[in-house]
Image: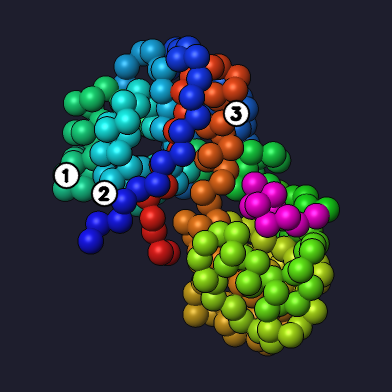
């Protein structure tokens, strides 16, 4: 059975914003030139010039596009867009189907990947800390030359998150997804590091921070060994689950600033 997308709409006074003005504003707000990314950040597909309603979602999937059309969106704003490094550049198959729908309905597609992860208040890491109630949350400097400043965050647990088991249960409750946990559930946990999405490879940087636990979205086979051998607890909370909040915050920000209507649509994804 096809999962029904969840929508969360914020009504407004139906004001509008010029598409190119929005593109310029977001480029400045998210500092898109700050970091070298794996995809183009900003306007990826040009639609109508005037935008009254923005739909936000995690990934620019066909399901999200269908839902945005049904809701009368003029623009779609996502974290995971298209045209990734090493993608097939031909407009065939999956890309053709997606692009055809957008262009038929003159819907603009905006995508912000690492710039959204890095934003100090609207970003995925900042927003995850708010959802989880973590305290003293702040971005950490790069651990080695060539690494990205501010991509990994550090902070402390709060409330009933004093052990790894309690932290895992809190993650499950607040994100609505059972996480994968590596480590002794009775281990005391106070200091933590985290990075949303496919950030399992940063566990060595988290270990260097001397934290009790590291949380990311995805997990890979080497992560298990690194966590066990280096004595750091690890939680894989879900790529999609950890990256739903930055894009929502960005959409809410735009609605508040420009008066456009914003609607977040969550297309369920178990990864």
Dot 2: what SS?
loop
Q: Residues within 10 Å of mark 3 (few under 14, many from 20)?
A: some
Find residue 92 and name its label: 1
Residue 21 appears in the rendering = no
Find residue 88 and name its label: 2
Q: Residues within 10 Å of mark 1 (few under 14, many from 20)?
A: few
Residue 158 appears in the rendering = yes
Q: Magenta stretch?
A: 127-135
User: Does 103 sit left or right of 116 as displayed?
Assistant: left
When the figure is inspected, residue 139 is found, relative to residue 99, above or below; the finding is below
Q: CA distance from mark 2 to mark 3?
A: 34 Å
The residue located at (51%, 49%) in the rendering is: 244
Find residue 8 and name its label: none
Q: Which of labels 2 and 1 is toward the front?
A: 1
Quick one: 98 or 179, which is closer to the camera?
179
Tell me residue 234's x, y (percent).
Answer: 64, 75
The residue located at (60%, 48%) in the rendering is: 124
Residue 214: quarter of image: bottom right
Tell me residue 235's x, y (percent).
Answer: 61, 72
Q: Which of labels 3 and 1 is toward the front?
A: 3
Residue 106: quarter of image: top left
Q: Are marks 3 and 1 in contact (CB under 8 Å)?
A: no
Q: Which residue is mark 3?
A: 253
Q: Please identify the quadrant where the N terminus is shown.
A: bottom left
Q: CA distance from mark 3 to mark 1?
A: 35 Å
């Amino acid at each position: 059975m096809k999962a029904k997308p969840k929508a969360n709409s914020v009504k407004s006074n139906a004001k509008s914003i010029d598409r190119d003005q929005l593109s310029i504003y977001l480029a400045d707000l998210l500092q898109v030139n700050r970091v070298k990314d794996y995809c183009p950040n900003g306007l990826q597909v040009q639609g109508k010039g005037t935008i009254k309603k923005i739909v936000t979602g995690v990934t620019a999937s066909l399901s999200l596009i269908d839902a945005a059309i049904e809701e009368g969106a003029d623009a779609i704003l996502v974290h995971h867009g298209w045209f990734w490094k090493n993608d097939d550049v031909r407009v065939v198959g999956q890309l053709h189907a997606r692009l055809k729908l957008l262009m038929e309905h003159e819907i603009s597609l905006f995508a912000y990947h690492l710039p959204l992860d890095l934003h100090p208040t609207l970003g995925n890491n900042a927003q995850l800390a708010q959802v989880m109630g973590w305290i003293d949350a702040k971005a950490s400097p790069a651990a080695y030359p060539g690494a990205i400043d501010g991509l990994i965050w550090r902070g402390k647990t709060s409330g009933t998150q004093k052990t790894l088991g309690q932290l895992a249960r809190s993650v499950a409750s607040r994100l609505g997804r059972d996480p994968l946990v590596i480590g002794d559930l009775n281990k005391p946990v106070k200091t933590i590091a985290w990075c949303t999405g496919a950030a399992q490879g940063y566990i060595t940087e988290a270990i260097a921070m001397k934290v009790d636990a590291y949380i990311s979205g995805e997990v890979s086979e080497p992560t298990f060994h690194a966590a066990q051998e280096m004595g750091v607890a690890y939680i894989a909370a879900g790529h999609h689950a950890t990256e739903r909040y930055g894009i929502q915050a960005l959409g809410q920000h735009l609605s508040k600033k420009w008066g456009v209507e914003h609607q977040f649509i969550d297309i369920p994804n178990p990864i």
